[in-house]
């Protein structure tokens, strides 16, 4: 087994989740060059993991800008909800008026029908 | 007002605006840091961070709490950064190739900076910022923020296989930049 065959797998091997095959492992164990390369990948990975806890100083005014944007978005949302609510109320009113009208028409029609029946009977 | 992130999230989901504001206060520096690492400059990082919080605010009800809030925010930030960088590349009419470095990587171009790098961490920060954006995004999200390949692929709009290939290339480039000796020996041998 040659170094270049193993080299391709060393970046993943540094993470520890990718197991090298038995032959590859044996090669690394006996090859100083591949060992050195693996150590370098591991050093880089350790340094990167350590960077997670590093927090950069945010540029001035960023927090205020974020909060202002959210405030604006919140207001827009509230206005939209209000308009949607009014639209629902308006449509509800129309529907109620329509239903009342229809009910009235049915009542009138029923009354007229019963009057006509009485007239016919007399 | 609660101070714990989980309680703040719960309150914000109930419509408590001040709870969401507090969440922003507690997390914005970290979000900005990620945005900076992904975009490579302050101005773009500000835009990405602002956009990320707007999206988080609008989508908070979709946060189910099965991951940490910070992880959810990382994913949103990564997505915003990918969108931002994509738009920017289109506007420039020169889509950046994965192999196109943002800066000249030849040591002779800026030997002073390399010579004065204090330690591996400093050199690494510089090497990451010199990576092409597509490679940088994957290696930052995987190796610094420990996001799973699947999440990275989903937020960057690529396949898991492509994410893994980019990660491999990014790690290889970082090692070649930080430890050029082995590659030099190899080149001499060829």
Image: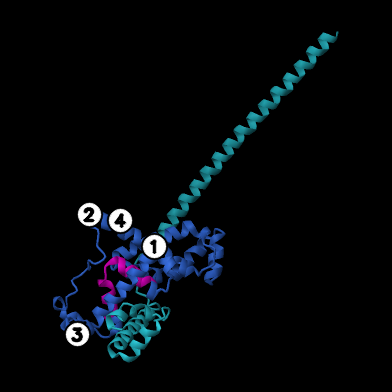
Res. B159 mark:
1
Label 3: element kind:
helix
Label 2: element kind:
loop
Tell me where residue A95 appears, x and y as whole percent. 62, 33
Tell me where residue B63 appears, x and y as whole percent. 52, 62
Q: Can residue B74 be seen here?
A: no
Query: Mark 4 — residue?
Result: B87
Badge 1 density bin: few <14, some 14–19, many ≥20, Cα 10 Å: some
Name the residue nearer the viewer: B175 or B20: B175
Instruction: Tell me the CA gap for discs 4 and 2.
Output: 10 Å
What subunit carries mark 2?
A: B
Whether labels 4 and 1 share one chain: yes
The residue mark sitting in front, 3 or 4, is 3
What subunit carries mark 1?
A: B
Badge 4 density bin: few <14, some 14–19, many ≥20, Cα 10 Å: few
Q: In this view, does A13 lie to the left or right of B178?
A: right
Tell me where residue B86 appears, x and y as whole percent. 31, 58
Tell me where residue A96 appears, x and y as whole percent. 64, 33
């Amino acid at each position: 087994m040659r170094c270049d065959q193993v080299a391709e797998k060393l970046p993943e091997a540094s993470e520890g989740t990718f197991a090298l095959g038995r032959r590859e492992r044996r090669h690394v164990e006996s090859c100083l060059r591949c060992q050195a390369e693996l150590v370098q990948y591991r050093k880089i990975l350790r340094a990167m993991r350590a960077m997670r806890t590093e927090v950069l100083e945010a540029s001035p005014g960023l927090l205020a800008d974020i909060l202002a944007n959210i405030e604006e978005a919140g207001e827009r949302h509230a206005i939209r909800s209000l308009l949607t609510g009014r639209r629902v109320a308006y449509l509800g009113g129309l529907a109620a008026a329509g239903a009342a009208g229809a009910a009235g028409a049915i009542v009138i029609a029923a009354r007229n029908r019963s009057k006509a029946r009485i007239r016919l009977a007399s | 007002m609660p101070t714990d992130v989980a309680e703040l999230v719960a309150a914000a989901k109930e419509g408590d605006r001040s709870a969401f504001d507090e969440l922003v206060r507690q997390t914005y520096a970290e979000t900005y840091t990620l945005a900076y690492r992904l975009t490579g400059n302050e101005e773009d990082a500000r835009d990405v961070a602002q956009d990320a919080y707007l999206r988080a605010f609008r989508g908070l009800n979709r946060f189910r709490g099965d991951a940490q809030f910070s992880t959810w925010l990382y994913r949103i930030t990564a997505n915003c950064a990918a969108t931002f960088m994509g738009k920017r590349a289109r506007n420039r009419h020169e889509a950046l190739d994965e192999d196109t470095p943002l800066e000249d990587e030849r040591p002779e171009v800026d030997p002073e900076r390399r010579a004065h790098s204090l330690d591996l961490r400093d050199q690494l920060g510089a090497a990451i910022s010199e990576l092409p954006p597509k490679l940088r995004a994957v290696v930052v999200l995987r190796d610094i923020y420990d996001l799973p390949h699947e999440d990275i692929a989903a937020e960057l709009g690529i396949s898991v296989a492509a994410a893994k290939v980019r990660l491999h290339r990014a790690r290889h480039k970082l090692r070649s930049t930080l430890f050029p000796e082995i590659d030099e020996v190899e080149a001499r041998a060829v």
